[in-house]
Image (cartoon, grey):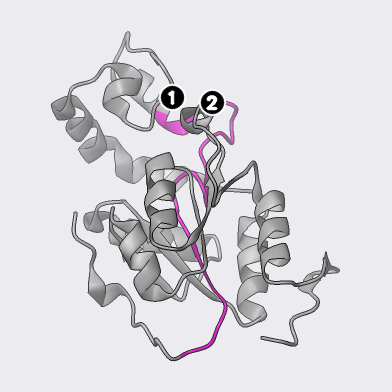
Amino acid sequence: MKQEKSRGIVNKKARRRIVGFDIDGVLTDEMADGKNIWQREIEAYFPGIQLLEPDFAFTAAFGLSLEEVDKFMEEKAPEVFRKVKPQRGSREFIRYLQDAGFTVYFITARWPRYEEITREWLAHHGFRPSALWFTEDKGPLCKELGIEIFVDDYWENCLDIRAHGVRALLMSAPHNLGCPEEKGIYRVENWDEIRAHVLEYYGLSTWESGKISGTSAL
């Protein structure tokens, strides 16, 4: 999948704090109801199908063919993208970062045909990114955009992001719990830990009473 360069404009001379976030599994809370929303929808769509092992790919996780996955995504993905809930604390922290002068990019591997649904969901839940990009090649784009920290739940993406000189935060998920520790990749369990890591990285102090202090250097 090729990145859609029309999604954002890069000012390479700008001196701003720039962070990036994946959408699925980072902004979205796929476990909000105690069971992964994709697992629940797949098991309902394919009677008798059960989770074989936690895996990022539905083919491996459920023993499905690519054709079956494509058919499921065609029919059910829009519904899931609309009803999934945001992670607790995600919207609030992103708003505070933007109020403090940060540039916030969202980069998702969703197919571009889901752009309208994605933008509607973001707007409905109060997310207003500086730009929204659709691509699987996140490492090169992070470097091009000048992103300093990127949060993703896919291990291979984090490896690629780190290889392009960007600090990667790995959001814990069942499919990445067995991944080894790697220098330059930092595991986070929730948005409280994302917040703590970002504030520490930029030398900011605590987040108190609805604002970030220590932002005068921005």
Q: Say what amino acid the circle numbered 2 marks.
A: Lys
Q: Quadrant of the C terminus?
A: bottom right
Query: Relative to 188, is 9 above or below?
Result: below
Q: Residue farthest to the top? A: 48
| Mark 2 residue crowding within 10 angstroms, few (<14) / some (14–19) / many (20+) | few
Q: Say what amino acid the circle numbered 1 marks.
A: Arg
Who is closer to the viewer here, 123 or 96? 96
> Which residue lies at the image location 32% right of the left edge and 18% below the top edge?
62
Secondary element type, mark 2: loop
> Which residue lies at the image location 37% right of the left edge and 52% below the top edge?
160
- Expressed as whole percent of the image width and height from the top left, the position of residue 104 reads 51, 71
Q: Quadrant of the N terminus?
A: bottom left
Marks 1/2 in contact by CB < 8 Å: the verdict is yes
Who is closer to the viewer here, 162 or 67? 162
| 55 lies left or right of 86 | left
Query: Relative to 12, is 183 above or below?
Result: above
Query: Relative to 95, is 107 above or below?
Result: above
Tell me which label, 1 or 2, sits earlier in the chain: 2
Q: In which quadrant of the rendered view does residue 42 lie?
A: top left
Secondary element type, mark 1: helix
Q: Residue farthest to the front? A: 183
| Mark 1 residue crowding within 10 angstroms, few (<14) / some (14–19) / many (20+) | few
Q: Is 131 contained in the magenta span? A: no
> Which residue lies at the image location 64% right of the left edge and 41% below the top edge?
189
Q: Which residue is mark 1?
A: 40
- Expressed as whole percent of the image width and height from the top left, the position of residue 156 reads 38, 42
Q: Which mark is residue 159?
A: none
| 71 lies left or right of 107 | left
Q: Which mark is residue 35?
A: 2
- Span colored in magenta: 14-38
Q: In which quadrant of the rendered view does residue 10 lie?
A: bottom left
